[in-house]
Image (cartoon, rainbow, N blue to C red):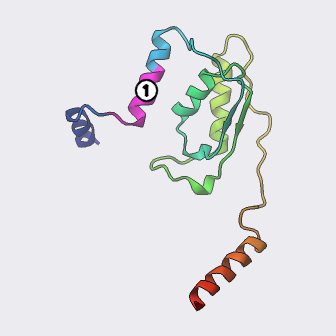
Amino acid sequence: FLSYEAKKQTLNGFDLCDMVRHIHQGILDMGGYVGARLHSVFVDEVQDFTEAETTLCMLTSSNPNGFFLTGDTAQTIARGLSFRFSDLRSLFYHQAQADPSGRTRSPREIHKLVNNYRTHSGILGLANITVELIERF
């Protein structure tokens, strides 16, 4: 890690973590977020977001409860992340505790989809037939 940070510094470079930290610091320095507010936030593949990135979304929202977050805990691709939806509940809880207006609420429910509609038997059958045809010709 130290060699990575040193190399990044010699190249005058930055990575995603640096950018997120810089944006957070800028918001703190200004006394809070002053830009245009997002009415609703829709995030797919939320399992690849860090808590800091999710918090940035919360800070820029005019409706702290206007989030629609989807993801699959079995598909985390970002190294070093171990995502759980209960972590989001905790993040919203702590945000609600820090919200003097009392508008932020922790989600009452987290809805889990138990059926995988992307790879149902019809899609898998079509994929298998396609592969068989390619192999034959």
Identify the residue at the far bottom of this view.
136
Q: Quadrant of the N terminus?
A: top left
The answer to whether 40 appears left or right of 48 in the picture is right
Q: Which residues are magenta?
A: 14-24
Q: Main secondary structure of the magenta part?
A: helix
Q: Which residue is mark 1?
A: 21
Per the image, is 92 magenta? Answer: no
Residue 25 rendering spot, x and y as whole percentages: 44, 18
Identify the residue at the far top of this view.
31
Per the image, is 17 magenta? Answer: yes
Identify the residue at the far front of this view.
137
Vertically, is 123 above or below 97? below
Identify the residue at the far left of this view.
10
Vertically, is 33 above or below 77? above
Vertically, is 59 above or below 118? above
Residue 88 rendering spot, x and y as whole percentages: 65, 37
Of helix, strand and loop, which one carries label 1?
helix
Vertically, is 17 above or below 75? above
Residue 42 rendering spot, x and y as whole percentages: 68, 36
The answer to whether 80 appears left or right of 37 in the picture is left
The answer to whether 59 appears left or right of 111 in the picture is left
Residue at 61 percent across and 57 percent down: it is 74
Residue at 60 percent across and 28 percent down: it is 57
Residue at 46 percent across and 22 percent down: it is 23
Which amino acid is tagged 1? Arg
Q: Quadrant of the C terminus?
A: bottom right
Residue at 74 percent across and 17 percent down: it is 103
Q: Quadrant of residue 70?
A: top right
Q: Quadrant of residue 109?
A: top right
